Amino acid sequence: MKVIIAGRLGKTLCVYTLLLVVGCSHHSDIGLDRNHANGFTAKGTQAYIACIKHELTSGTKTFTVEDNGSINLLIGSIDRTTAVGLVQLSRVSGQTTYTVYQRHAWVDKGRLINAAQGCAKD
């Protein structure tokens, strides 16, 4: 009897652990992704966005949305829960700041993050 209970308990713990890991590894809002970078750019907003779009793979869908004084460039989808990337631009103390998020950055070695950082330097 003790062996059966221990076996069931072990399987139950294993299932709960697996569900916890799977549940925690996925989040819906791209702005919560751990693959991100931020900084400042001397370029104007439109020039910066144009530079990033130029660096993306041909045919990549992009959507520009203004939100409370900031500009969001969404990559792949206008929906933040399905977008593969997001670049947020805002003005702080007269400077343009950016924050870039890339879901699954390991797939293409952080191409969007690298583009955002490179475009900020030019």
Image (spheres, rainbow, N blue to C red):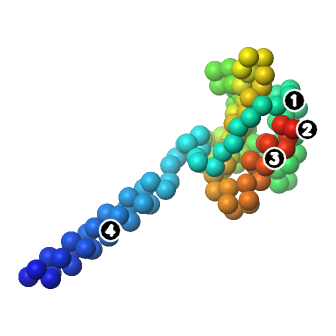
Q: Is residue 101 visible?
A: yes
Q: Is residue 32 left or right of residue 6?
A: right
Disc 1 or 3, which lies upstream in sequence?
A: 1
Contact between labelled residues 3 and 1, with CB atoms less than 8 Å apart:
no
Sort mark 1 into few (<14), some (14-19) or many (20+) by Cα contacts within 10 Å.
some
Tell which of 12 and 79 is nearer to you. 12
**Residue on which the image places disc 2:** 122
**Residue on which the image places disc 3:** 115
**Residue on which the image places disc 1:** 43
Instruction: Name the amino acid type tagged 1.
Output: Lys
Spot the residue most to the left: 1
The relative height of residue 115 versus residue 13 in the rendered view (above or below) is above
Query: Disc 1 and disc 3: Cα gap in Å?
Result: 14 Å
Q: Secondary structure at mark 4?
A: helix
Query: Disc 2 and disc 3: Cα gap in Å?
Result: 11 Å
**Rendered image quadrant of residue 88:** top right
Contact between labelled residues 1 and 2, with CB atoms less than 8 Å apart:
yes
Disc 2 or 3, which lies upstream in sequence?
A: 3
**Residue on which the image places disc 4:** 15
Disc 2 or 1, which lies upstream in sequence?
A: 1
Q: Quadrant of the C terminus?
A: top right
**Rendered image quadrant of residue 12:** bottom left
Disc 2 or 4, which lies upstream in sequence?
A: 4
Q: Is residue 25 left or right of residue 76?
A: left
Q: Is residue 74 visible?
A: no
Q: Residue 42 appears at what percent x and percent y?
A: 86, 28
- State how many labels appear: 4
Q: Residue 115 appears at what percent x and percent y?
A: 81, 47
Instruction: Name the amino acid type tagged 3.
Output: Ala
**Rendered image quadrant of residue 31:** top right
